[in-house]
Image: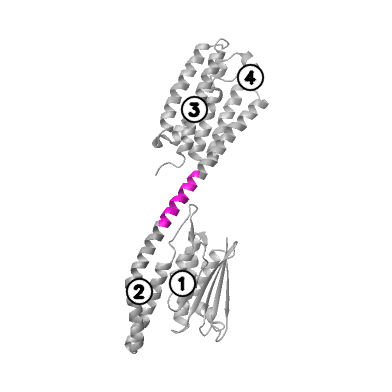
Amino acid sequence: MDDPVAHLWRGTVALRVVTFLFALGNAIVQRDEYERPWLAWATIAAMALWSAFTIQAYSRQHGRRPWIVAADVAVTCGLMSLSPLIMTDAQFLFDVPLITTIWAAGPPVAAGALGGQVAGAVSGFVVGLSTYLNRGGLTVDLVRDVVLLAGAGFLVGMASTTARRSAVRLAQALRTEAATAERERLARSIHDGVLQVLARVRKRGTELGGEAAELAELAGEQEVALRSLVAAAPTESTVDGDADLRPALQLLATSRFQVSTPATQVMLPAGTAFELTAVVREALSNVDKHAGPDARAWVLLEDLGDEVVISVRDDGPGIPDGRLASAEAEGRMGVAQSIRGRVEALRGTLELQTGPGEGAEWEVRVYR
C-alpha cells in the first residue's frame, strides 16, 4: 500500500533543499567574519552531502526508517556543535545564526512524518537543546526557536497520524463496501434458489402433516437462519479495535428467537462485543433448554450513547425462586459463569425480572 503520508515526505525533502540553500547563503554572507572559514566550508560541504543522502532516502518508502531519522537528528546536532569553533565571540554577541541555521529544522519535521506528534516534538526539543548548548545562553530568540522547532515537529506528526488513520478507515470502508456488494449478490442468488426451496418445503410439509410437518418446521428454522445470515451486516472493526455488535446478534435469530437492533452501528471494543454475544447466546440456550419447545424469545439491542443495553425476554413459565441458587450449588454454572460472570468482567450490570407464568427477562447494561 502506498504511504499515506508521502505528501509530508515530499514537503520534508523540499524543506531540506530550501533550508540548505539558506544556510549556504548565510555562510557566503558571513565568510569574511568567521574565525575558521575553512571549517565553515567543510561543514557546508558535509551538510550538502547529508542533504543529498536524506533527500534520496526520504524520497523512497523503503528509505523512511527510524534509524535514518535518528541519524538525521544526530548529524544535525553534531554539525551544529562546530559553530563555536567556526564563529567569533562577536558573532555570538550579535546573534549571528549558527552554521546550520534553519537547516536544523529538517529532522523534527522528518521525525513527525515518521513517528507522529510525540516523536516530532521530542526531536524538535533535542535540536532546540543543542542550539541552547552551542549558544551558551538563554534568550527570548532561543526560546522562540525551541518552541517553533518542537511545534513544527508536533504539527507535522499530528498530520501524519491523522493521515494514517484516515487511510485505514478508507481501506476498511472499501472492504465493507465490497463485502456488502458480495453479500447482496449472494442474497439474490440464495433467494432465487435455496430460500424458495425451503419455503416450498415448509409450506408443503405443513399441508401434509405428520412427519412431513416436522420436516417443515426444520425447513422453516433453516429458512429464518439463512435469511438472518444474508441480511446481517458484514463484521467491521476500526483502527482502534472496535467492532459492530449488531451482525453477531442478528445471526442468533431463528423462527423462535427474534432479534431487533438499531439501524446504525453499535461500535464496542471487539472483546466486549464478543462477550456480549456469548451472554445473549447463553440466555437463548437456556430458553431452548428450560422454557419449553414452544417458548419464544425476543432480543432487543439499544444504543443509549454512554451505555449499551441488551434485553432478552421469553414467554416461558418463568424461573422459580431459588432455582438459580440451587443450580449453582449443584455445579451447573451456566448462569453464574456464562452470563453473570461475563457481565461482571465487563463491569456491567445484570438484572433479572421473572415470575411464575410471566417468563423471564434479562437486562444487560455495559457502559462505554
Q: Is there a contact, CB below 8 Å, between mark 1 and mark 4?
A: no
Disc marking residue 16: 3
Q: CA distance from mark 3 to mark 1?
A: 59 Å
Q: Secondary structure at mark 1?
A: helix
Residue bounds of the magenta highlight: 163-177
In this rendering, the label closer to the viewer, 3 or 2 = 2
Instruction: Tell me which label, 1 or 4, sits earlier in the chain.
Output: 4
Say what amino acid the circle numbered 2 marks.
Answer: Leu
Say what amino acid the circle numbered 1 marks.
Answer: Arg
Q: Position of residue 143 (x, y in %)?
A: 64, 29
Given residues 343 and 300, the one toward you in this image is 300
Q: Secondary structure at mark 3?
A: helix
Residue identifier under label 1: 281
In which quadrant of the rendered image does the N terminus lie? Answer: top left
In this rendering, the label closer to the viewer, 1 or 2 = 2
Q: Is residue 168 magenta?
A: yes
Disc marking residue 195: 2
Q: Position of residue 173 (x, y in %)?
A: 45, 54
Q: Is there a contact, CB below 8 Å, between mark 2 and mark 4?
A: no
Residue identifier under label 4: 95
Given residues 74 and 23, the one toward you in this image is 23
Left or right: residue 50 compared with residue 200: right
Say what amino acid the circle numbered 4 marks.
Answer: Asp
Disc marking residue 25: none
Q: Is there a contact, CB below 8 Å, between mark 3 and mark 4?
A: no
Q: CA distance from mark 3 to mark 2?
A: 65 Å
Residue depicted at x 65% and y 23%: 137
Q: Which class describes the residues within 10 Å of circle 4: few (<14), some (14-19), or many (20+)? A: few
Q: CA distance from mark 1 to mark 4?
A: 73 Å
Instruction: Tell me which label, 3 or 2, sits earlier in the chain.
Output: 3
